Image (spheres, helix red, strand yellow):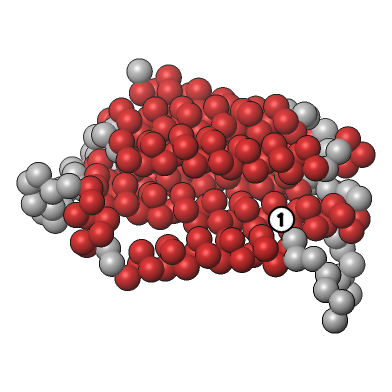
Amino acid sequence: MNIYILVALILFSVMAVFLRDLLKSAICLAVASIFLAVMFFRMGATYAGVFEVSVVAGLITVLFITVIALTNDDAKVPENKWPIIIFPVALAIFIIFDIWFMNKFIILPSKALPLLAQGEKFGDVLWGQRTFDLLGQIGVIFAGVFGVFAFFRRKTDE
Amino acid sequence: MSELAYICFVAVAVLVFIGLYCLMTMKNLIKLLIGAEIVAKGVSLALITAGVEKNNIMLAQSLAITFIVVEVALVAVALAIVIGIYKRKKSLDIRNLNNLRG
């Protein structure tokens, strides 16, 4: 089942890149995010899955669709034909190389990190083990907000 | 490495490849951001897969959430820049943005 979800994720990502209509591209990107969130849920990463659905599939898609609506049809950009023609061959070669390369690592045993105590909660890890980098995360949020404000600032009389 | 980690890391590499291919070949600014988003999806999947593989999913999730927040801030600012460029140039073509070329 996991492999089908990953194939769907890759398929929708390819469609998001190569569809000519930007709106359809944005929707394909959102669908790819939903498949990624499903993969997160299946791997036991429920919090990351919820964030992926709500923030990436929701908020970012809304931002993309808003920008596509604000930049109307006059903004259509003619793309070259050759990237679409070369892409299947390049992707097939890359996948073959990728599988061959990753086969070297499949024999390696994975070493579990003895970091977490049994039964430790997500909140303990997020707020307890990671303290100062969360301040950085809050700084990134403010940087994004003020960045958008700066670009849409109205001209003053000065 | 488990079988799940193996197929996930193969998918990560493919996603990053697709995103970089988009970044290198597309001319539309919004398509370039979509390419960056696809690379970001690959990185998120890599973080979670590494967490599952190392039996430390909680820390991996918290890192992935941080990464998602950074991604949102990046996309918000980049889309604001795209709108600013569109207002000025009336085009989303990156070939029109060569004013600084010496």
Q: Indicate the position of residue A103 as horizontal and vertical percent values.
A: 34, 37
Q: What residue sits right under mark 1 in the picture? A: B80
The chain containing the residue under callout 1 comes to B
Q: Seen in the image, is B50 located left or right of residue B56?
A: right
A124 and A76: which is toward the camera: A124
Q: Nearer the viewer, residue A68 or B11?
A: A68
What is the x, y in percent for residue B10? Answer: 42, 36
Amino acid type indicated by mark 1: Ala
Regarding residue B27, the answer to whether it shows in the image is yes
- Give residue A64's quadrant in the image: top right
Q: Does dot 1 land on a helix, a strand or a loop?
A: helix
Above or below, comparing residue B75 to residue A31 in the picture? below
Query: Image check: B56 left or right of A77?
Result: left
Is residue A92 in view?
no
Image position, residue B55 (x, y; %)? 19, 44
Q: Say which residue appears at 91% left-offset and 50% top-offset.
A: B90
Residue found at x 50% / y 56%:
B70
Q: In this view, does B56 lie to the left or right of A10?
A: left
Identify the residue at the far front of this view: A157
Q: Which of the image's four quarters has the N terminus of chain A? A: top left
- Residue A23 location, quadrant: top right
